[in-house]
Each structure stands twice: as structure tokens, then as C-alpha cells.
């Protein structure tokens, strides 16, 4: 028997915050649970899979390849989502995800998600809206960081 994600906990994640409890039950019903040991890799940069990941428990390192070195660029906390771009546009992975501690990750495959289109379009709409919000907030954060770096380099707009 397959393990099913905790639908109540799913409602407290980035993709479930807009969903009703019944909508969370439906979404959890098409998701899977993956258990990772510390140090285990969930996905590799440039991988071709398109799964969406919701971290339920533990920590995941987001690792980017830079000049043949691996660099941890972010540490995911429970409730956060990874893989939105690959999930939506089916492009290769831009980073590696590795468990920093024993972790539990909820997974969602695009074809399972798309199965909601005919019978549960509101769930599909709400999740896609949350993915857009995540992407938008990440873009704003990256723009802010780029501006701060630019200001630091040119030593303008502040004390450094």
C-alpha cells in the first residue's frame, strides 16, 4: 500500500494554503511520499524528470554547479516547494536537491496533476496560482539580491 501525504499538513504548505480541507484531501490523493536519508540526493541538476516537490519534514540543500564545484545556494525548510519551473514547462532541472537531514518529501507528477482538469479544475487553478506566486516572489528576491550586489560593487546607495 502506498503512503499518502498528510492532507491537513498539505494545507500549511506553499501550494496548499489556498485550498479547503477537502481540496487538500483530493490533492494528497494524487501525491506520493518519499523518505530521504541524510545526504541522499532527490534530483540532480540537468535531470529530465518534472516532479514537483513539497518538503514536509527535514531540510533540503539546493545545490548549484559553479565552475565544477557544488555550491549550496539555499536551504529549504518544511512547507517549501521545489521544482516549479521543471514541473510547469518541462525543462531540465536547474539545481540538485540533497537531504541535509532525514527528510520527508511529498511529490506530484505533472500527469497526475493534469488529471484534475476535468473533475477538479478549481484545485488545479489554485495550485497553479500558488506556483505563480512562488515564482514571482523568487524573482523579486533575486532582483533585490542583484541590486544589493550591484550597489556593493559600485559602493553606492548605502554603507558597505
Image: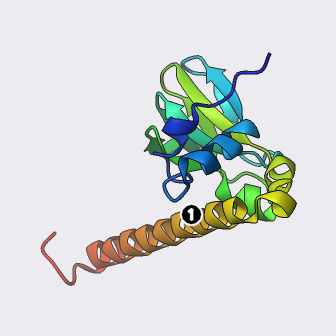
Q: Is residue 25 above or below residue 135?
A: above
Residue at the far front in the pictured view: 22
Determine if residue 68 is in view.
no
Residue 61 pos. (x, y %):
51, 37
Residue 151 pos. (x, y %): 29, 78
Tell me if residue 8 comes above or below residue 34 in the rendering. below
Q: Is residue 56 left or right of residue 94?
A: left
Q: Is residue 70 left or right of residue 113?
A: left
Q: Residue at x 87, y 51 (%)?
A: 111
Task: Pick whichever, 36 or 123, lies toward us.
Answer: 123
Q: Position of residue 52 (x, y in %)?
A: 69, 47
Examine the image and state in which quarter residue 88 appears. Answer: bottom right
Quarter of image, res 98: top right
Q: Is residue 152 visible?
A: yes
Q: Quadrant of residue 12?
A: top left
- On-image quarter of the C terminus: bottom left
Looking at the image, which residue is at 22% across and 83% down?
156
Q: Secondary structure at mark 1?
A: helix
- Along the viewing direction, whichever of 119 and 112 lies nearer the viewer: 119
- Give whichever of 146, 24 is nearer the camera: 24
Q: In the picture, which quadrant includes the N terminus? A: top right
Q: In the image, what residue occupies the spot 47% across and 27% down? A: 58
In-image side of 158 versus 121 (left or right): left
Instruction: Name the residue beneath numbered marker 1.
Output: 130
In this picture, residue 146 sits left or right of residue 86: left
Q: Residues within 10 Å of mark 1 (few under 14, many from 20)?
A: some
Above or below, 10 against 110 in this view is above
Amino acid at each position: 500500500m502506498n503512503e499518502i501525504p498528510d492532507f491537513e499538513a498539505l494545507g500549511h504548505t506553499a501550494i496548499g494554503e489556498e485550498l479547503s480541507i477537502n481540496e487538500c484531501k483530493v490533492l494528497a490523493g494524487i501525491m506520493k511520499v518519499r523518505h530521504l536519508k541524510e545526504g541522499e540526493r532527490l534530483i540532480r541538476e540537468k535531470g529530465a524528470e518534472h516532479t514537483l516537490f513539497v518538503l514536509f519534514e527535514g531540510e533540503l540543500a539546493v545545490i548549484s554547479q559553479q565552475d565544477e564545484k557544488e555550491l549550496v545556494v539555499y536551504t529549504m525548510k518544511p512547507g517549501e516547494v521545489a521544482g516549479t519551473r521543471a514541473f510547469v514547462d518541462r525543462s531540465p532541472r536547474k539545481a540538485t536537491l540533497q537531504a541535509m537531514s532525514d527528510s520527508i518529501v511529498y511529490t506530484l507528477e505533472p500527469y497526475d496533476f493534469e488529471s484534475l482538469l476535468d473533475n477538479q479544475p478549481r484545485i488545479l487553478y489554485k495550485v497553479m496560482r500558488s506556483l505563480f506566486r512562488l515564482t514571482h516572489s523568487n524573482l523579486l528576491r533575486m532582483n533585490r539580491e542583484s541590486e544589493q550586489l550591484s550597489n556593493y560593487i559600485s559602493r553606492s546607495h548605502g554603507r558597505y
